[in-house]
C-alpha cells in the first residue's frame, strides 16, 4: 500500500517538494510509462486540493500521419477530449509553444476546450525530453484562479523530475 497523504498545513513549496519526492519514489523502478503516468495522475489528485481533472496528454502521430498532436493519456476526472491539435486550446498552446499556461479564467482563454463544464481555471505544463515536448501535464479546477505561479513552478519541477519515466 502507498500512503502519500500530505499534511494539509504544508505551504505550497513544501507540498511540491513532498509531491516530487513521492513521484520519484513511485516511478523509480518502473519502466512502463502508462503505469507511471497513471500513478502520477493519482498522486496529483491526492496532493492538490480543488481539482476536477489531473492528468497527461502525450505528443503522438496524427492519424493521417501529417505531423503530431496531443493524445489523451492517464488521468483522474471526467472523460475528456481525446485528440488536441497543436496550438489549439490551453493544452495545444502549451505543447506548441513549450511554455507553461497558467489560466486564471478558462472562459477568457481564446479557444479553450471545455472537457468538463465545471472547470474554471487551468494549469498546463510541458514535459520535455532532450529539448522536445513529449507530453503535457494538465490540471483543471472548478475554482477561479486556483493556480498560482508557485503551483506552476512546482509542476514544472515535477515535469522535469519525471520526464524520463513517462
Ligand atoms: N481544457 C483543455 C482540454 C483538456 S481538458 O481540460 C481535460 C484545453 O483547452 O486544452
Image (tube, rainbow, N blue to C red):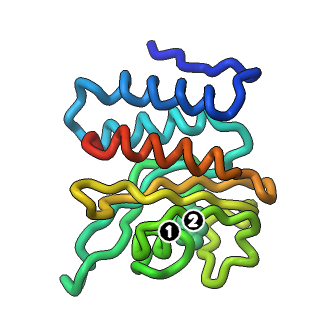
Residue 83 in view here: no
Q: Does the residue labelled 1 lie within 8 Å of ligand 1?
A: yes
Mark 1 and mark 2: Cα distance apart in space = 8 Å
Which residue: 76% across, 21% down? 9
User: According to the image, label 1 marks what residue?
Assistant: 91
Labels 1 and 2 touching (C-beta < 8 A): yes
Residue 111 in view here: yes
Quadrant in the picture for residue 103: bottom right
> Foreground: 151 or 6?
151
In the image, residue 101 above or below residue 108: above
Compare marks 1 and 2 and give the one earlier in the sequence. 1
Q: Is residue 116 left or right of residue 86?
A: right
In the image, residue 66 above or below residue 127: below
Q: Report the disc number at residue 101.
A: 2
Q: Determine the secondary structure under disc 1.
A: helix
Which residue: 80% across, 59% down? 144
Q: In this view, does 37 lie to the left or right of 44?
A: left
> Foreground: 147 or 115?
147
Q: Is residue 28 left or right of residue 14?
A: left
Amino acid at each position: 500500500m502507498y500512503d502519500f497523504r500530505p499534511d494539509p498545513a504544508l505551504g505550497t513549496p513544501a507540498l511540491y517538494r513532498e509531491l516530487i519526492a513521492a513521484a520519484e519514489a513511485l516511478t523509480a523502478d518502473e519502466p512502463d510509462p502508462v503505469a507511471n503516468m497513471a500513478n502520477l495522475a493519482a498522486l496529483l489528485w491526492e496532493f492538490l486540493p480543488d481539482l476536477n481533472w489531473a492528468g497527461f496528454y502525450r505528443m503522438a502521430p496524427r492519424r493521417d500521419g501529417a505531423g503530431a498532436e496531443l493524445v489523451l493519456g492517464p488521468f483522474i476526472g471526467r472523460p475528456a477530449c481525446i485528440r488536441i491539435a497543436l496550438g489549439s486550446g490551453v493544452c495545444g498552446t502549451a505543447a506548441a509553444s513549450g511554455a507553461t499556461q497558467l489560466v486564471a479564467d478558462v472562459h477568457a482563454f481564446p479557444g479553450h476546450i471545455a472537457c468538463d463544464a465545471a472547470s474554471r481555471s487551468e494549469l498546463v505544463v510541458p514535459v520535455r525530453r532532450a529539448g522536445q515536448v513529449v507530453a503535457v501535464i494538465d490540471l483543471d479546477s472548478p475554482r477561479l484562479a486556483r493556480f498560482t505561479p508557485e503551483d506552476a513552478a512546482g509542476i514544472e519541477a515535477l515535469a522535469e523530475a519525471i520526464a524520463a519515466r513517462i
